[in-house]
């Protein structure tokens, strides 16, 4: 049983919340991707004219 | 509908069901919006990419799932090619959900239900929930110790709310059929409806941008 538990990975616990380090890392990575998608400029974007539909 | 050889190109009368159906199909989306080649400037943002990324991942999911269905359990467990396709199926699902959730976050914070887009938003919500069910039955259909573990963990919760009467997670054949037949069919229809609605009402603009009807 110890071997099986060892294979389950590491967990972070805080009160009733328990999450594996892997899942937490994936969530943090997804939030990072979301933030980058919002703030990073899109290639070829025109900033001078908001009505330009050719971009 | 009657066929009469007049020497002229056939012209359907407004009362024929084919003409009505054709007229209805042609008005599902505005002219030129089914496969547009121009989009509003505000779409030049990475956050708008995640919808089509989700679609692309779903395409790989369906393609690899069809191959797994052709090969069968032994093939995806034993042969190297089967294991490779099985991995492609798993990881395309992981990407599908990751892209879909980022798409969900983007559309939520953009209040994407604005501008008569409530049905577009709701079909997305239903597609998300349906995808969870499809993925869940997929994990139950792996035919390994993981699927056994997941099914025995899930049965008590599902039985406690009465779902187990018609949705028995301990029945691998039922779960496999839900996974490869019922849920993909329903999900496919909802996704098509979602995309058609996006084309019908247009890409939702950012909160501070002006709505653009043409593209």
Image (cartoon, coloured by chain):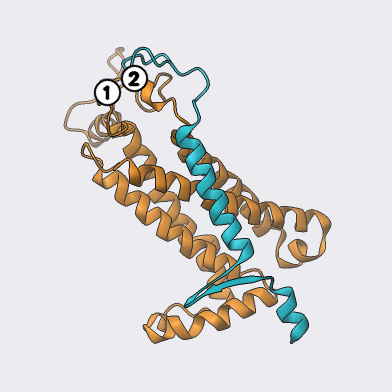
Residue B30: x percent and y percent? 28, 26
| Colour of chain A as rendered | cyan
Q: Nearer the viewer, mark 1 or mark 2?
A: 1
Residue B158: x percent and y percent? 43, 80
Quadrant assignment for the N terminus of chain B: top left
Q: Residues within 10 Å of mark 2 (few under 14, many from 20)?
A: some
The numbered mark 1 sits on a residue in which chain?
B
The numbered mark 2 sits on a residue in which chain?
B
What residue do we see at 81% from left, 65% from top?
B78
- Quadrant in the rendering for residue B18: top left
Q: Please name the residue that numbered disc 2 is placed on.
A: B215
Q: CA distance from mark 1 to mark 2?
A: 7 Å
Q: Secondary structure at mark 1?
A: loop
Chain letter of the orange region? B
* Same chain check for tags 1 and 2: yes
Q: Is A3 situated left or right of B205 in this image?
A: right
Whether the residues at callouts 1 and 2 have beta carbons within 8 Å, the answer is yes
Residue B155: x percent and y percent? 50, 83
Q: Which mark is residue A54?
A: none
Q: Please name the residue that numbered disc 1 is placed on.
A: B212
Give the answer, above or below, for where B1 lies relative to B119.
above
Q: Residues within 10 Å of mark 1 (few under 14, many from 20)?
A: some
Instruction: From the viewer's side, name the closer residue of B202 and B101.
Output: B101
- Quadrant in the rendering for residue B207: top left
């Amino acid at each position: 049983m110890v071997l099986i538990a060892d294979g389950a990975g590491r967990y972070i616990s805080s009160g009733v919340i328990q999450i594996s380090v892997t899942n937490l890392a994936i969530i943090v990575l997804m939030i990072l991707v979301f933030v980058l998608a919002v703030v990073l400029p899109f290639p070829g974007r025109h900033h001078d004219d908001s009505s330009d539909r050719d971009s | 509908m009657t066929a009469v050889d007049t020497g002229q190109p056939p012209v359907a009368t407004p009362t024929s069901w084919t003409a009505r159906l054709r007229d209805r199909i042609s008005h599902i989306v505005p002219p030129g919006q089914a496969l547009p080649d121009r989009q509003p400037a505000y779409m030049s943002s990475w956050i708008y990419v995640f919808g089509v990324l989700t679609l692309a991942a779903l395409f790989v999911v369906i393609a690899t799932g069809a191959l797994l269905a052709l090969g069968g359990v032994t093939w995806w467990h034993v042969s190297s090619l089967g294991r490779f396709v099985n991995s492609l199926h798993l990881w395309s699902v992981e990407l599908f959900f990751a892209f879909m959730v980022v798409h969900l976050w983007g559309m939520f914070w953009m209040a994407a239900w604005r501008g008569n887009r409530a049905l577009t938003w709701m079909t997305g919500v239903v597609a998300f929930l349906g995808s969870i069910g499809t993925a869940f039955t997929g994990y139950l259909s792996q035919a390994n110790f993981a699927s056994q573990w997941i099914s025995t963990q899930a049965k008590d919760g599902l039985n406690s709310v009465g779902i187990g009467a018609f949705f028995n997670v301990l029945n691998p054949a039922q779960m496999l059929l839900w996974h490869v037949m019922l849920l993909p069919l329903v999900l496919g229809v909802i996704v098509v409806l979602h995309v058609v609605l996006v084309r019908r009402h247009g890409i939702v603009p950012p909160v501070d941008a002006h709505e653009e009807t043409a593209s």
